[in-house]
Amino acid sequence: PDKLGVASSKCYVSSLNTRAKMHYYRYENEEVSCCYKYLMFSYNIIFWLAGAAFIAIGFWAWSEKGVLLDLTQVTRLHGFDPVWLVLAVGAITFILGFAGCVGALRENICLLKFFSGVIGFIFFLELTAAVLAFVFQDNVREWINDFFLSNVKAYREDIDLQNLIDSLQKMNHCCGAKEPDDWNLNLYFNCTINNPSREKCGVPFSCCLSDPADTVLNTQCGYDVRKGPKGVWSNAIYVKGCIPALEEWLPRNIYIIAGVFIVISVLQMMGIFFARTLIGDIEKVRFNYY
């Protein structure tokens, strides 16, 4: 009986040693790839910091306009506030960057699945928007026209919107949505008899023809321009609308637009690939561990 007990004990100890060796062997050879882990982290830390910067810029812009002291200003604006776009892009980028960074470092499958799922959903929305814009070009053109006109009305209500419209008109050498008379929709520039504004029957300075010889910006160059006959407007201002100008710009820069879209798509696919590969490694290690 003693010999039988000793043999049994030896067999039990041998079994434990074998299990320990198997467990140790799996732990050493099945581990999460450091390459994908830190590639995922590096990929997302840039977006995380960029998102934080966008949010900071957005709140700084609102503080400069006094919005943070009176939040009701947000609801009183009738046009598009560019700060909203900056904050939205910043928030989405910050959340995705955070999920990617923390998910990679902590090997958190939930955060990594959230990251890859949202990136995939955004990519799907981009493709859908591109296809719909191509199929329904007339509807998109009308929507852009209505959007531009609504912001023409609110031109003087927000300094950021004003700068955005001025930049758009100067870069594209255009004025109004379809023609300079679109500025009749604005309270300050309309040509009604009862309009007391000094800018009556005028256009913003960004509609004026640029003169390389001018060293000082003339912000009053558009005053009273539309009081004269339309035939002479072209001597002082751009007479082409911004919608036609945009339609001419797109075909000329189609390769640049396609290149930007391809780069963005490749970056998104890389993020999804890194996340899914890391998820697979983590699940494999956990399966072998347990």
Image (cartoon, rainbow, N blue to C red):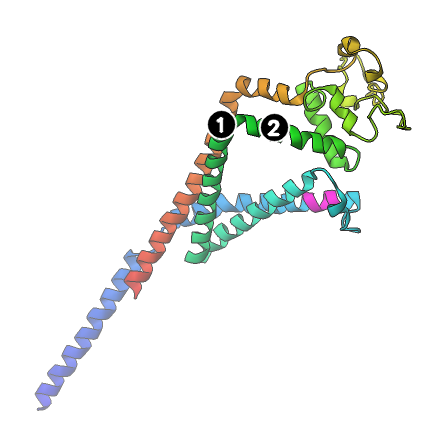
The circle drawn on residue 115 is none
Quote the CA–CA distance across marks 1 and 2: 14 Å
Q: Nearer the viewer, residue 61 or 2?
A: 61
Query: Label 1: which residue?
Result: 134
- Label 2 sits on a secondary structure element that is helix
- Magenta-drawn segment: 57-62
Residue pictured at 59% horizontal, 45% vertical: 51
Please provide percent x and percent y for residue 124.
45, 40
Residue pictured at 38% horizontal, 48% vertical: 276
Query: Label 2: which residue?
Result: 142
Judge whether residue 199 is colored magenta: no
Answer few, some or many: residues within 10 Å of disc 2's Cα (few below 14, many 20 plus, some between 14 and 19).
few
23 sits to left or right of 243: left
Give the amino acid at mark 1. Answer: Phe
Up-down relation of residue 164 to residue 237 (above or below): below
**Residue reaching furthest to the bottom:** 1
